[in-house]
Each structure stands twice: as structure tokens, then as C-alpha cells.
Amino acid sequence: MNAYASIKLVPASKIDTITTTELRGYFQYYKDITAKTGNQVDWAYSQAAFPYEIIDSNEKQEEQITLYSENERYRAILISIQKEKIMDKDDTPRIQTNICFTLPEVATFGDKGKANEYCKFLAKKLQAELHLFNGRVMYYYKRKLQ
């Protein structure tokens, strides 16, 4: 199952760029809030909500994180931060940061579901533009009417 989704940090987003350290912080926040939910319902929800171990790896001059799981229902999700040069509407160049979620060949359908969940969480937190695995686009930032 080789699939790809991305979160684009557009000019209307909360931030312009992100690092792997900040990304780890968002995942830690996710683990914390799911643990609190689990405490409220008296169930170990944090382990079910985030069954991965975060592994840093810097390959190909881009920052990359691997979410790896020993659980039989999950395998791995690759998350990389890529920067690309694009032109704005008024033809001024700018650097756009993308957070790319890639499912390797060994990934399961459980990984795809978790990746969708994490993409939506991050896109909402960052007020970004989300391009899902199925090609659909979700906008989590305020758009101007023209």
C-alpha cells in the first residue's frame, strides 16, 4: 500500500514553517489529550489512539520522522517536511512548507486510518490545507470570498 497525503502551510496558516521538533511536540500533545480522554472514560485510550514509536531519521537532505509500531494491526507511517519554491498570485516567489505522510509498502489499512486521523488533527491545529490520500482537499484555514 504505497500512498501519499500532504499538509500544505499556506499564507493563511498559523505558521509558515515547521521543524521535526515542533512536529514531535504536536504528536506529544496528541498523546496527552488522548490520555486525558482515556482517564475520563476509564480506559487506556492513549495506547489505542497512538500505537507508534517516533523515530527520527534524516535522509535525502530532508527532515523525516518514522512512526513505527510493534502492534499487529499497524506497521509504519513516514512523515517528511519538504519545502518548495512557488509563485504567489502577484508573481512573488515564496517558500511553501509541506508535511508529507507516506505509507510504505508494508503499511496496513490501520496505518492509513491513523495517518488520516493525524493529518486532520495537524491540519486543524496548523490551519492548513490538507490533501488526503484519495485526492480530496480539505481547507482548515479561513478563505476569503471573492
Image (cartoon, rainbow, N blue to C red):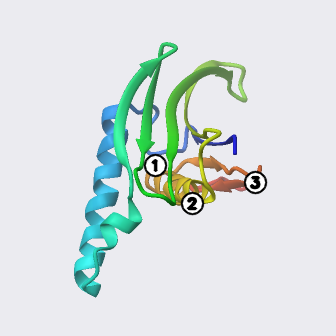
Which numbered disc flags the more N-terminal residue, 2 or 3? 2
Which numbered disc flags the more N-terminal residue, 1 or 2? 2
Q: Which residue in the structure is indicated by mark 3?
A: 136
Q: Amino acid at mark 1?
A: Leu
Residue 3 rendering spot, x and y as whole percentages:
69, 43
Residue 39 rendering spot, x and y as whole percentages:
22, 79
Which numbered disc flags the more N-terminal residue, 1 or 3? 1
Instruction: Report the front residue among 96 and 56.
Output: 56
The residues tagged by marks 1 and 3 sit, at their Cα atoms, a distance apart of 18 Å
Compared with 115, 46 (above or below) is: below
- Residue at 77% x, 49% y: name it: 135
Q: Residues within 10 Å of mark 2 (few under 14, many from 20)?
A: some
Residue 20 in sight in this render: yes
Q: Which residue in the structure is indicated by mark 1?
A: 126
Q: Amino acid at mark 2?
A: Gly
Q: Which residue in the structure is indicated by mark 2?
A: 110
Instruction: Report the front residue among 72 and 17.
Output: 72
**Contact (Cβ within 8 Å) of mark 1 with mark 3:** no
Name the quarter where the N terminus is drawn: top right
The residues tagged by marks 1 and 2 sit, at their Cα atoms, a distance apart of 24 Å
